[in-house]
Image (tube, helix red, strand yellow):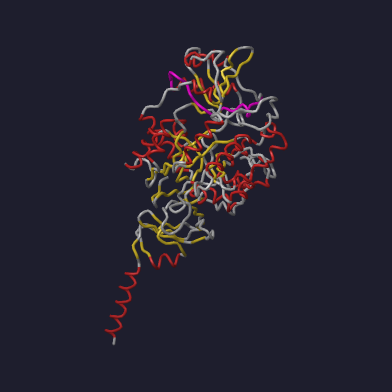
Amino acid sequence: MRKSLLIIAVSIAITSCKQQEKVDTIVINSNTYTVNSNFDKAESFAIKDGKFIAIGTNKEIQDKYTSSKTIDAENKAIYPGFIDGHCHFYRLGLQQQKVNLVGTKSYDEVLQKLVEFQKEKNTTFITGRGWDQNDWKTKEFPTKEKLDALFPSIPVAVRRIDGHAMLVNQAAIDLAGITIDTKIDGGEFFKKDGKLTGVLIDNAMNFIEVPKPNKQEQIQALKDAEKICFDLGLTTVDDAGLDRQVIELIDSLQQTGDLKMRIYAMISNNKENLDYYLNKGVVKTDKLHVRSVKVYADGALGSRGGALKEEYSDKKGHFGALVNSYDDLQRLAKRIASSEYQMNTHAIGDSANYVMLKAYNKFLKNKDNRRWRIEHAQIVDLKDFHLFKNIIPSIQPTHATSDMYWAEERVGSERIKGSYAYNDLLKQHGMVALGTDFPIENVSPLHTYYAATIRKDLKGYPEKGYQMKNALSRENALKGMTIWNAFANFEEAEKGSIEVGKLADFIILENDIVTVNGDKIPNTKVLETFVNGEKVN
């Protein structure tokens, strides 16, 4: 009898061991937001071969699976890896090699930083980015006289924070061959008293040929950008405008394991890229996805380059401009509609939004599941919101909290009602893709989440939030940074939520941003970032 009981006990133990499947990692004691269709939460999950293999309670996972690596989350909040739906990843890396003018509070501070940078770097061409005259006491574009005095022979070209205006000195002007009589469509050379001021708008900047980085500088830029993004919880980035050479460099680094960031690449709108990629078709690997074209319809609101239906409220007779002609935009939309590619168009002003929405709806007629996007959708005529029914609004919430101090001066009290209207856009389409547009804005996706839901700047202004009727709920903002961004990238089957079979990209945060007091959101620490179940920060 005792022998029989012993045999039964051993048999049960063996059976039990067989039922426990060995996996790579088990996470327990977590407050996990799966962001699945039911917005379920979970305590535990198991990872094998870089994918989620099971999600459930601690008991369910530990009874069924075993692993040499168990992570006790200590009830910390876990989310799917954040996806930035519109940024400039490669440019962020390059910016680390240039003078950083973000946050400068005066033109004199800009000049001081340029002098300090040149003393350290001693370059033959000074470049940088980040100045914003709207942050200065005197909110006017600078002129080049002081720049010429400091750098009489070294070319200087520094972009405004939005990338749609540039300040250059006379040495750069002479190098580019620009004169007082030089003409340009879709741009402007600012003049005063019959002389060039050194400020170039949109297409006028194309005259300035900044030295290109070498291959090693490019590789370093990509690695620098990856580290910044991983540390802040981003596991996928949508780079809004890359050329073939950079895309192929990214692919080579990903294939060797030297770059682990997942990248959804929008090709820049030029003949070489279009001819190559539209004919080649979609490019898809585990970490790289190329299937969209980044197009510019107009400029930026801060530099009054956004194309408006009516004149700017603070500059009579000025309407901004399309940076590509109406006919060119129509031809381009028709060509892309005939390919497998997605069209993602930068549209700031209500005129640019209207032109592109009408073109999209025209050329996508009877074409399903194309997921074309309007990038920014910043100023939209109230009569035109319905045109977003089949078009994805790709929006950047921190633009609202950066521009709120002066935006109404630009567009007036009526047009501001259709500006930065994220909840109204959500109601029209049913989802929104959220991004930052970094390095124009801060990289942190937690700043995106804070601006989308709380609608304040980092100093807590305004007290009651900015245009709160257009704030997103915390649940919808989280979807906009995860599953909705994945959908906008045609990747919802593989990422954007913590579900069985999907890539094991997830992050552990210090606070639960869905429930914590709003003022704690922007400074919440990203404790750990995982890609394919591997810790990367």
Between 326 and 135, the one nearer to me in the picture: 326
Residue at image coords 41%, 49% = 531
| Numbered label tally | 0
Q: Magenta stretch? A: 121-137
Q: Magenta includes 136?
A: yes
Q: Position of residue 396 (x, y in %)?
A: 57, 41
The quadrant the N terminus occupies is bottom left
Between 330 and 257, the one nearer to me in the picture: 330
Q: Position of residue 370 (x, y in %)?
A: 49, 46
**Image check: 103 left or right of 253?**
right
Residue at image coords 47%, 65% = 57
**Image check: 483 left or right of 307?**
left
The quadrant the C terminus occupies is top left
Q: Position of residue 529 (x, y in %)?
A: 44, 48
Extreme residue in the left direction: 3
Extreme residue in the front direction: 366
Using the rendered view, name the quadrant where residue 262 is placed.
Answer: top left
Between 124 and 363, the one nearer to me in the picture: 363
Task: State whether residue 43 is above or below residue 460.
Answer: below
Extreme residue in the bottom direction: 1
Q: Magenta includes 74?
A: no
Q: Position of residue 221 (x, y in %)?
A: 41, 33
Task: State whether residue 536 is above or below residue 96.
Answer: below
